[in-house]
Amino acid sequence: MIAKLDTNGVLLGWYLDTDTVEEPKVTVTQEVWQQALEINANKYVDGNLVFEDLRTDEQKANDNDKIANRESGIAKLKELGLTDAQINALVGE
């Protein structure tokens, strides 16, 4: 398998060994490819395919705000007397 990378080592996609792929790229064994899939590898660092949080600080802060807002909303629904099943039905769990 061939891992197509950008210039920062970010994984852009997988290709067959028979495909023509421009640099930067790295050829890996089926075993390494399978391991990369299992960990959701998204970057090639120091000879290894790894998972790295590629979000910006702003994206991380926005995600944390969403989680906090969700938790606050769930707490308010519980205060109103809704059951866990009712809350899960409302929030899609």
Image (spheres, rainbow, N blue to C red):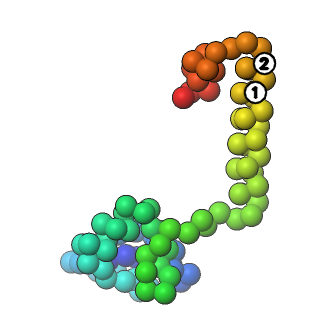
Where 12 falls versus 25 (above or below)?
above
Q: Nearer the viewer, residue 18 or 41?
A: 41
Question: Label 1 to label 2, Cα distance in Å?
Answer: 6 Å
Write the residue at 71% across / 42% down.
67
Q: Amino acid at mark 2?
A: Glu
Asked if residue 22 lies left or right of residue 71, the reply is left
What kind of element bears circle 1? helix
For the image, the number of numbered tags is 2
Q: Amino acid at mark 1?
A: Ala
Q: Assign the C terminus to one quadrant of the image.
A: top right
Q: Quadrant of residue 61?
A: bottom right
Where 6 falls versus 70 (above or below)?
below
Write the residue at 47% across / 79% down.
44
Query: Measured from the top left, where is residue 1 in percent x and y?
Result: 27, 75
- Furthest residue in direction left, as rendered: 18
Asked whether the viewer can see residue 69, the reply is yes
**Circles 1 and 2 in contact, beta carbons < 8 Å:** yes
Query: Measured from the top left, where is residue 7 in percent x and y?
Result: 53, 83
Where 75 falls versus 16 (above or below)?
above
Residue occupied by mark 1: 75
Residue occupied by mark 2: 79
Q: Quadrant of residue 33?
A: bottom left
